[in-house]
Amino acid sequence: MANLAEIALRRLDGAYFEGNLPGNSATFAERYRVRLLGYKLDAVAETLFESAAAASRLNFFLALEAQLPTSLVNRAKSAASSIRTGSEFGQAMAKQPGKLTELRSIGEHELEDLFGRLVTQPLPYSEQDLEDLKALADRYSVGDRQAAARENNAVLAGLIPDYDWSRAMTVTDALRIAAVWSGGDQTLEVAPRFKLKRSQRRALSLALESVLEHSSYAYFDIARHKELWKRLFTALHVGDYKVPRLQAAAGMLFDGQLGSVDALLEYLIREEDLDGLLIHLRSMPGVFARRLHELIRKMPGRRAEIISEFEAVAGRVSTRVLVQLRNYFAGPSKSDAPNLPFAGKSRSARNGFLENRKSGDSSDVIAAVDSALSTKLSGKKVYIREGGEKIGVMTSNRSTATGSRAMASGSRVKLGDDPDFITLFTHWKNLDGGGRVDLDLSALFLSEDLGHSEHLSFYSTTSPHARYSGDITDAPRGAEEYIAVDVAHAKSRGFRYMATVVNSYTGQKIGSIPECYAGVAIAQSLNFGDFDAAAVEARFDLTAEGREVIPLLVDLETMELIWVDLAFAGASSGATMSGSNSLGSVLKFIVNYQGLTVGELIEKSGAVLVDSEADAEISIDPRMSDQVAQILV
């Protein structure tokens, strides 16, 4: 379990915690942080130079918080001798202020505030979130705080004995809570085997009776997961308690008399009964948003009425769903991208493609969504870190590992000032338990229509305009593979795009490897030498859950990195990118897609963008999903 010093260093930028519990006292080394060549690192100092003479004993050991290439770590470890000898590296450090800064000390109240933010964060918890919550829950009280994410409500019910999980509970929340109490998964993706204590059975039965009393739609929700509910009703022993509505629901379910709201909506859509649909959808704005395109497509003659009705309730739809809806309607049509990629909600879920059925002008829908967004952050002062206004909004409904550096698919980053050479790379490290990880980097050069391609990989290592660094099969201390590109020569051969592909030869899903990222660096030639992290223009963690992943695409004309981070299935060395090919589907989608950026969302939602973090009510790094979640509630 993480100690409090570790949590403070990981989650509170520039802070350490010096508590009074064994193991929680930050060492002198942990009080200092060094910024080296654009990467944020924790620095561990053996000796503080209190005088000029003491400087000769200064030595740094770098923790891989930023998951740096091994070559840079080795370079950084020589910082002390470099400073003493006045080398180029030492001079560079000396010239740049803020390279070594003492971290601010924090108190109990800041850690307690952090605990409160974790409890109420809008994203489902990551594994790191859970580890930190467990450590902090032993020290601080949850009070009257309430989870903002449904799955988190179930997690807290199992983690914190005095947490009030019954507030604003739905019947599906009850399934999740019962699953957690039974030692199962709150996502319900694996059917739980319910085994509850008598006190838990009674509390859950009484809470469910109250839900059924106040919501007639709760009966529909029971029918959505009818097999799970049959199991839970059996485990609850509902006949032991005075819960007539719950007993009636159980009886109707086992008798086959309960139908789901989805089945009702499907029937009304088939009958084109818009008036009947609106009776239900007005009270379910989130469902309305998710069904909007289907309604427009199947009842085109009533398009204006459907959009008007949606706009009337769209203000009650979460910002996250509104951004997803806008990105869909502003995205490529069927003629440009026949298939749309989708990712499952968890690491065990299936990824794949859906038929793109969108066509025609969608400006009326986009206007309705923008109207709903316009007051979401009205008057709030927002600070965006590191010039991230042009980075796409991450709308994933799951929290990435804390400290990870992620980016929304479709985000674009300008690569230098028209460089002559670039290096595309991937970095990874073996699993924490020592399991070997062998990743293979390859590249595809593609024409503007994605029809003409050339392949570069460990079995085809050179071309007139590119060179591959070589195959690495084990990474106990971290490893990198690179592909260097002569931009002008590649363009002269008719290539517009270059895509990288990462294949997991040892079979792990890429997003499940704790240390794995990809990026682009500016190069001077096709010769590699030591990889220079100072030349890295952009690098981001890979989160896609697949054994074959496209990390990024480079537009050689505009010299932009287009972040992809999407999984696909099928051979990556095919000569053409047909629409039915999984890799081709990803590429056709991504070159025609650009989602709402963080800066655009701030502007459209009525917030005020400020230049100083000190003046902000909300401070976000667009690469951190848990921070972006603050503006997506």
Image (spheres, rainbow, N blue to C red):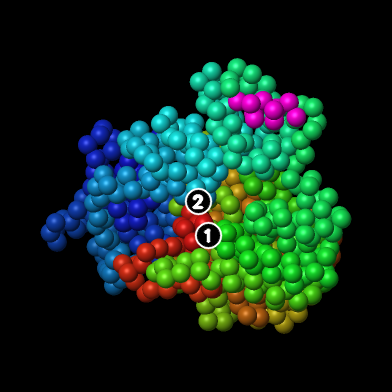
Q: Which residue is mark 2?
A: 122
**Coordinates of residue 422 in the picture (x, y in percent):** 58, 72
Q: Is residue 206 visible?
A: yes
Asked if residue 247 is among those painted magenta in the image, a careful observer would answer yes
**Horizontal and vertical percent for residue 504?**
67, 48
Res 243 quadrant in image: top right
Whether residue 96 appears in magenta in the rendering, the answer is no
Asked if 548 appears above or below 162 in the picture, the reply is below
Image vertical order of residue 330 relative to residue 172, above or below: below
Range drawn in magenta: 243-252
Q: Nearer the viewer, residue 595 or 154?
A: 154
Q: Secondary structure at mark 1?
A: loop
**What crowding class fits label 1: few (fewer than 14 Cα within 10 Å), some (14-19), or many (20 or more)?**
many
| Residue sitting at x 77%, y 59% | 275
| Residue plotted at (28% across, 35% down) | 23
- For the residues labelled 1 and 2, the Cα–Cα distance comes to 8 Å
The circle on residue 632 is 1
- What mark, if any, has residue 344 been given in the picture? none
Q: Name the residue at 42% across, 39% down.
A: 133
Image spot of residue 79 (x, y percent): 32, 59
Left or right, residue 567 beside residue 431: right
Amino acid at circle 2: Pro
